[in-house]
Image (cartoon, rainbow, N blue to C red):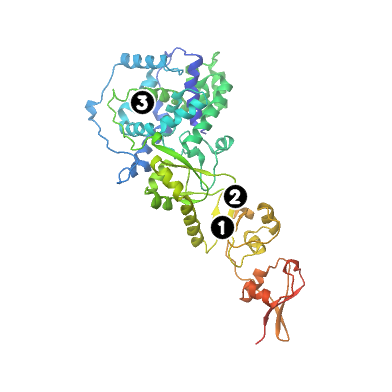
Amino acid sequence: MKWISLTSLLFFSLSALATKPDSSQSEPIDTTVIEQTSSLVAAMDSMMHAPYFEMAESAKLTFDTGFLEIPKNEIPTFSDSIVKNRLDSLNLRTPFNVVHNDRVEAFINLYAVKRREQVSRMLGLSEYYFPMFEEVLDQHDVPLELKYLAVVESALNPRARSHAGAVGMWQFMYSTGKMYDLEQNSYMDERMDPVKSTHAAAQYLKYLYRMYDKWDLALAAYNCGPGNVNRAMRRSGSKDGNYWDLYPFLPRETRGYVPAFIAAYYVFEHADEYKINRVAPLKTFFETDTVHVKGPIFYSELSLKLDLTERELSFLNPAYKRDLIPAYSDKTNILRLPREKVFEFYEQQDTLIASTYETMGEENDGNLKEFEEDRVYYRVRSGDVLGRIAQRYGVRSSEIMRWNNLRSSRINIGQRLVIYPKGGNHYAQKSEPKKIEVVQDGGKVYYQIQSGDTLWDIAKARGISVSQLKELNKNVNYSRLKPGMKIVVGTNG
């Protein structure tokens, strides 16, 4: 089962810092090495249908899709000696152990010959993402070449998802994402956030490096788990933990990751020599900036106010899953925009939030409900009482008071309440009016209060408003209603 692809590859790169073992091979090359790394090939092929490239076909695009492929018979080829010299040159200026062997050659052929169009798209994406990665990797004091790991893991697709459930550019599993404080709920998944997931990846790679003291072994452990790496070390009998000694004993899928990483590094550095055209971005990372959002905003509202397409917003902010920036009571969310739109956003933010609240209110019969993983935000409307709201969500009034720091059960129209529904039922269910038994005495109709009753329930059952019910019972202290008490709920005639 896949762990965190990013980490595994990242660690390999750094392992070269400590030692650069002989790359010669003592065993026949496994000709199926690329087929074994099926997830890598699948990630590359998925680039042909990625939403940001579909978007580029419209008038408002984020990427220029102009792709000019050369005929197959004109694709440049180079002798083994030239390729080896280039790899040796890279090896001299990087902490990674850049070697030349048949396995690396197989992946160079995959990138530079068989999947040239996919690589052209990744080259374009790299102009946007690599400056972002380098900034984060530098903060964690790890080699900047680790950026090429995301090429192997996800083909630079922030919304990539493996068959095992790994998500994002760095392919984090759910549990590991939680371990590194990546928020994952119904509205957002920070495993798909390019910046936050890169921070998490750098931290996780350091952890694995401390475990093995070799970056390439940490890389392998990321992909297949420390247990498999430890088993390969025992079976190989390697005393110094040389990755290439362990290679035959690693899981088949894992064997291709280090060669693929070296090949991606090489081909990206020598793309011009191979005449691989770049799908150039219309916006670079440095032409964007982030803003803090203090309330919920629909992409549709942003699109209208800022003259941006919803697909552009989705590309710049892949962590939001439902075209909505959610609201949280304990933090603000981050939105990435083109720099020229930042000032305009701050001018329009209050209007955008108000418009979103209005839209949500209309969609929910006048009540605002923003649904997160384990909470609901409810906006009080005319006729609401705390007991009735509590009953609707299967909780107690005292719980709502505690969650919202209320000193009394009094609530006001327009007030927003945070509620944690029982059983995780985030959606308020509309209930039928309660049926009550009444008795007539003279010219009035009475009802005996039962446990759990609220004025709202009683009024609704009688088809009158709470204010009308209070008018019928002017001398009653409504804060002291108890089961067994009788109140007037109507008149005869």
The answer to whether 124 is drawn above or below residue 408 in the figure is: above
Residue 405 in sight here: yes
Query: At 60% across and 53% down in the image, what residue appears?
Result: 424
Question: Which mark is drawn over residue 268?
Answer: 3
- Percent of width and height locating residue 160: 44, 38
- Percent of width and height locating residue 325: 49, 48
The answer to whether 187 is drawn above or below residue 400 in the figure is: above
For label 2, the SS is loop
Question: Which mark is drawn over residue 427?
Answer: 1
Q: CA distance from mark 3 to mark 1?
A: 49 Å
Residue at the spot of label 2? 374
At label 1, counting other C-alpha atoms closer than 10 Å, the crowd grade (few under 14, some 14-19, many 20 or more) is some
For label 1, the SS is loop
Marks 2 and 1 close (CB-CB < 8 Å): no
- Percent of width and height locating residue 186: 53, 48
Which quadrant of the rendered structure holds the C terminus? bottom right
Residue type, label 3: Phe
Q: CA distance from mark 2 to mark 3?
A: 44 Å
The answer to whether 232 is drawn above or below residue 393 in the figure is: above
Earlier along the polypeptide chain: callout 2 or callout 3? 3
